[in-house]
C-alpha cells in the first residue's frame, strides 16, 4: 500500500567501504628486474624489480605485489638477489631482506642496511659468492652468507660505473666509467677481484657515449656486451680469445651501432632477446627481421691497412677472396684503397657482390635451416686493379632484405714490385 511504499522509499541506503586502494605504477621510472626463487617449490620462481619512482615489487605473471621496506621514501633504484636475500639500493645505501624472506625487512629476521658514501650504480652477483656493489667513483665487494658474516671490502676506490651500464658476461662484470669499459675479474685468491680497462683503443667513443647511457645488455650466445645511449647510439664489445704462449687470453673487439630513434629504456631477457623503447612509446625487438621498421639497415667496416709484412715494397694487387657466413641473401659493396688512401694512387671502382645463404649436408643439418645448391662457406672472389704499399677493404651494405652476414676472413693476391723510393 501507500504506507509501505513510503517506508521502502525512506529506508536508509548502505554502501561498501574499504581501506584498500588500487595499485598504480607512476610514470617516469627506469626499471631493473631479476628472476629468483626464494622458496622450495617449483612454482615460486618470480620477478623482483624496482624503477626509482615506486616501491619495489614482486610479480609472478599474474599478481603484482609492492614490497614495503620501511624507508620513508620507499623508491629503490636497483635490485639483486644474493645468498637468499633480496637487495635494493637507495642512493648511496643498500638494504637486504631477511634470509629467504623477500617481504620482511625487519632486523629481527636478518635484514640489514649499509652504505658506500656515493651513489650506487650497480648491484651484481659475480663469481666467488660475491655481490659487487658499484658506485659512481668506486667498487666494493660484499662477501658472506648472512648478516652475521657479511663483509664489505674495497675493490677499487677510483673505478666505478655510470648507471645502467654494468652487466655480467661469462662470470666477469663489465661496466663503463670515465676510465673506459672495465672488466671485473676474480683472481686466484678466493673472493678477491681485479679491474682492468679493455677499451683503450676506442676511448674517444666511450667518452662520448658515457654521458648518454640509458641501458646495457649481454648476448651470451654471441659473447657480447652492449651499451646504449639515449640518442640511439651504442657500443658493442665482443669477447673472443687468442693463444698467448701456452695460455688462452681474452681479446675484445668493438663495434659501433646507431638506431634511427631516441631510446628511453632497454630490456633484455635470459634468451638474449632484447627490446628497445623509444621516447614516443614505441617498443621494438632488436636483431629481428631484415629491416628497421621498414627502413634500410646500413652496415660498414674497414679492415686495417695490410702491408703483407713488407711495408716499403710496392705491390700490384690482383684479387681479394672473401670467406663469408650468410644467413639469407646478402648484397655487399667492396671498395679497395691503397697506400693509406694516398691520392697519388688511382682510386678503385666500387664492386658489388651478391650471395645466397649457407648450404648444408643432407641427413646432418636441420631442414629449412640451409640453402640448396649453396656452399658451406661462401668465398666470393673480386678482381682488384691497384698499386701501393698496402691495401684496405671497405665493406658496405644498405638494404631491407639482408638476414645477416659475417666476414670471417679476406685473402689478398698480389705481386711484389720494387722498394718504395
Image (tube, rainbow, N blue to C red):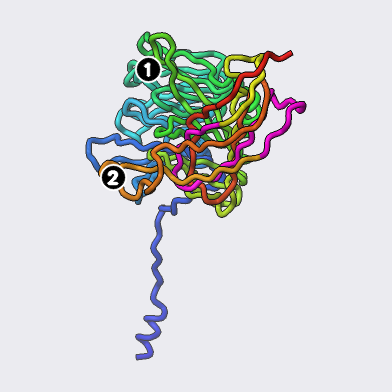
Res. 163 image quadrant: top right
Give how far across and how far down residue 29 sits, in percent. 54, 42
Question: Does the segment drawn in magenta span residue 327?
Answer: yes
Q: Nearer the viewer, mark 2 or mark 1?
A: 2
Quadrant showing the C terminus: top right
Residue lying farthest to the right in this orientation: 344
For label 1, the residue is: 143
Q: Name the disc covering residue 362, or none.
A: 2
Circle 1 SS class: strand
Give how far across and how far down residue 257 sits, in percent. 58, 37
Report the magenta residues as a range: 320-349
Question: Does the segment drawn in magenta span residue 412?
Answer: no
Cα–Cα gap, marks 2 and 1? 53 Å
Q: Is residue 366 above or below residue 3?
A: above
Q: Is residue 193 above or below residue 224?
A: above
Quadrant showing the N terminus: bottom left
Residue 77 visible in the displayed image: no
Amino acid at each position: 500500500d501507500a504506507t509501505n511504499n513510503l517506508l521502502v522509499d525512506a529506508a536508509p541506503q548502505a554502501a561498501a567501504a574499504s581501506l584498500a586502494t588500487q595499485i598504480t605504477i607512476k610514470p617516469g621510472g627506469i626499471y631493473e628486474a631479476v628472476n629468483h626463487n626464494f622458496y622450495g617449490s617449483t612454482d615460486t620462481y618470480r620477478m623482483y624489480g624496482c624503477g626509482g619512482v615506486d616501491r619495489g615489487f614482486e610479480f609472478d605473471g599474474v599478481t603484482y605485489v609492492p614490497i614495503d621496506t620501511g624507508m620513508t621514501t620507499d623508491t629503490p633504484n636497483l635490485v639483486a638477489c644474493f645468498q637468499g636475500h633480496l637487495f635494493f639500493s637507495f642512493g648511496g645505501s643498500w638494504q637486504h631482506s631477511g634470509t629467504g624472506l623477500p617481504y620482511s625487512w625487519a632486523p629481527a629476521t636478518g635484514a640489514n642496511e649499509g652504505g658506500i658514501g656515493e651513489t650506487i650504480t650497480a648491484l651484481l652477483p659475480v663469481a666467488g659468492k660475491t655481490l659487487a656493489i658499484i658506485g659512481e667513483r668506486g667498487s666494493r665487494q660484499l662477501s658472506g652468507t648472512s648478516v652475521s658474516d657479511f663483509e664489505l671490502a674495497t675493490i677499487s676506490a677510483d673505478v666505478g660505473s655510470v648507471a645502467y651500464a654494468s652487466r655480467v658476461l661469462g662470470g666477469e662484470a663489465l661496466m663503463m666509467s670515465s676510465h673506459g669499459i672495465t672488466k671485473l675479474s676474480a683472481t686466484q685468491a678466493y673472493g678477491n677481484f681485479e679491474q682492468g680497462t679493455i677499451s683503450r683503443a676506442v676511448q674517444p667513443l666511450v667518452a662520448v657515449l658515457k654521458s648518454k647511457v640509458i641501458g646495457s645488455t649481454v648476448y651470451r650466445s654471441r659473447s657480447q656486451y652492449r651499451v646504449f645511449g639515449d640518442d640511439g647510439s651504442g657500443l658493442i664489445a665482443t669477447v673472443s680469445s687468442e693463444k698467448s704462449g701456452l695460455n688462452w687470453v681474452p681479446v675484445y673487439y668493438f663495434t659501433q651501432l646507431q638506431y634511427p630513434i631516441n631510446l628511453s629504456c632497454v630490456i633484455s631477457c635470459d634468451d638474449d632477446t632484447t627490446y628497445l623503447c623509444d621516447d614516443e612509446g614505441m617498443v621494438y625487438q632488436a636483431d629481428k627481421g631484415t629491416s628497421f621498421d621498414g627502413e634500410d639497415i646500413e652496415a660498414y667496416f674497414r679492415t686495417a691497412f695490410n702491408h703483407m709484412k713488407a711495408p716499403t715494397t710496392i705491390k700490384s694487387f690482383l684479387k681479394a677472396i672473401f670467406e663469408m657466413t650468410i644467413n639469407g641473401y646478402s648484397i655487399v659493396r667492396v671498395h679497395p684503397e691503397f697506400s693509406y688512401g694516398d691520392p697519388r694512387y688511382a682510386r678503385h671502382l666500387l664492386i658489388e657482390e651478391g650471395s645466397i645463404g649457407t648450404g648444408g649436408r643432407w641427413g646432418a643439418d636441420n631442414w629449412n635451416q640451409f640453402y640448396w645448391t649453396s656452399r658451406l662457406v661462401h668465398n666470393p672472389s673480386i678482381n682488384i686493379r691497384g698499386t701501393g704499399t698496402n691495401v684496405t677493404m671497405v665493406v658496405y651494405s644498405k638494404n631491407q632484405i639482408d638476414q645477416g652476414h659475417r666476414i670471417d676472413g679476406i685473402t689478398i693476391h698480389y705481386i711484389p714490385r720494387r722498394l718504395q723510393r
